[in-house]
Amino acid sequence: MSKSISNCKLLIVTVNSKRSAFGVWRSAFGVFTIFKSYQYSPMKYQAISSELFVGNREKLVKLLTPGSIAIFQSNDQMPTSADGTMPFVQDADLYYLTGIDQEETILVIFPDFPDEKMREILFLKQTNEHIAIWEGHKYTKDEAREASGIRTIIWTDDFEQTISTLMAEAHEVYLNSNEHLRAVVEVETRNARFTKWCQTHYPLHNYRKVAPLMHKLRAIKSEHEIRQIATACDITEKGFRRVLKFVQPGVTEYEIEAEYLHDFIRNRSDGFAYDSIIASGASACVLHYIENNNACQDGEVLLMDVGASYARYSADMTRSIPVSGRFTKRQRAVYDAVLRVMREAMAMLTPGNTISQYHKEVGLQMESELMDLGLLDRIDVKHQHPSRPAYKKYFMHGTSHHLGLNVHDVGNIFRPFESGMVLTVEPGIYIPDEGLGIRLENNVVIQEDGILDLMENIPVEPEEIEDLMNT
């Protein structure tokens, strides 16, 4: 497929559809109307300007030590069983630096290499007629140049020969690993295998971790990135408004999940950004409930923690709605309490504040609300353990986390808030004895003059939710 096609009205492009019994992708055809040009994208989303990825690499280069080389590997295509594989999900750091959403990709950055053409190299899986027939189109070199802004593209088969030339001039080597505080890694990743290979073949080099540098960079979102997250939020809003018209007593949680997915996919989303939580009644008190297999009952509150992914950037929304279309007096009181805490928490997301101080202040606000609801009393508060505040009985999780290419995005928890950080705000109150769990969650950008709420158009006022459900 050519990089650019002009003056065309219809273009048929090959896209991945479903996996065959042989464990490979069969071709399907989608028809898109275009008028001026077409830029290849392997996914449903529209291609992103390479300006984003060029800028990201420039930021990383400024953090590397002189004479160093940095190497990033794509994720593996993970197996299931028999001849099956999971859908491919690109390594977030590699995507952040290249925009290339394809397996068997390697990025090498060596800013001080004598030959300017070799200072940025993208290694790409070489396609052939067999791959084209069974898996569909892969990036050509020209398409990869346009997508990433990297001029030197080499086939991955030539990586070892090329890297030997580069390593001869390198003093330090930056390699990547997953250092997210909540990561549970029980399989050997492509990055981990490469680290072993590299240290075996080049044992006398000095090795450094690139993850802290990536965490530093990715915590601050550029305008390009914020636009992608905002698009994911807008798609999430469409799904939520659809669901408000759909929910009624008797519908199942999985039917509601399907309604979201329908609107997400039809708006060019990658799908869900994470496993959706569609929890009615007492299931809302299970924080990571993902079975989504119960029928919604009259009088229950339905908690929905869902978000669309767009161009690999995530939205993360939670809304709690009355299955019958009207909150009871008690449900409304708890809902209003959570909404007040959410608004107070948003006001605390200011440059210079820290996550520990922020959570402490939110906890004090939640403590007051729980006392007003009769769930805590002064004795509970007086005798609480400093490391286990009384409010944790009903609000046991954190209020905010970084958001971006990962739902729980990378970022140093000891780093003060800065303008450009994107965080969730998600307080909740969970009362198992009442079969009631309410959580509300928006995504916001920290700015010097106050937050930008990327979900301000998604209904959250209880009166508006009730009105939309009953019209």
Image (tube, rainbow, N blue to C red):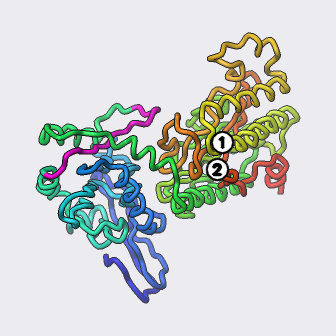
Mark 2 neighbour class, 10 Å CA radius: few under 14, some 14 to 19, many 20 or more: many
Give the main secondary structure of the magenta stretch: loop
In magenta segment, residue 204: no
- Quarter where residue 262 is shown: bottom right
Q: Give the range drawn in magenta.
A: 169-184
**Pointer 1 or 2: first along the chain:** 1
User: Relative to 247, is 293 above or below?
Assistant: above
* Quadrant (top left/top right/bottom left/bottom right) for the N terminus: bottom left
- Give the structural element (helix, strand or loop) at label 1: strand
Residues under numbered marks 1 and 2 in contact, where contact means CB atoms less than 8 Å apart: yes
**Is residue 251 in view from this perspective?**
yes
Q: Is residue 248 left or right of residue 200?
A: right
Q: Residue flagged by tag 2: what amino acid is it?
A: Val
Label 1 sits on residue:
425
Given residues 15 and 118, the one toward you in this image is 118
User: Relative to 126, is 415 above or below?
Assistant: above
Residue ID at (30%, 54%)? 103
User: Relative to 440, is 119 above or below?
Assistant: below
Q: Residue 445 appears at what percent x and percent y?
A: 62, 51
Given residues 339 and 256, the one toward you in this image is 339
Mark number displayed over residue 23: none
Q: Residue 387 appears at what percent x and percent y?
A: 62, 17
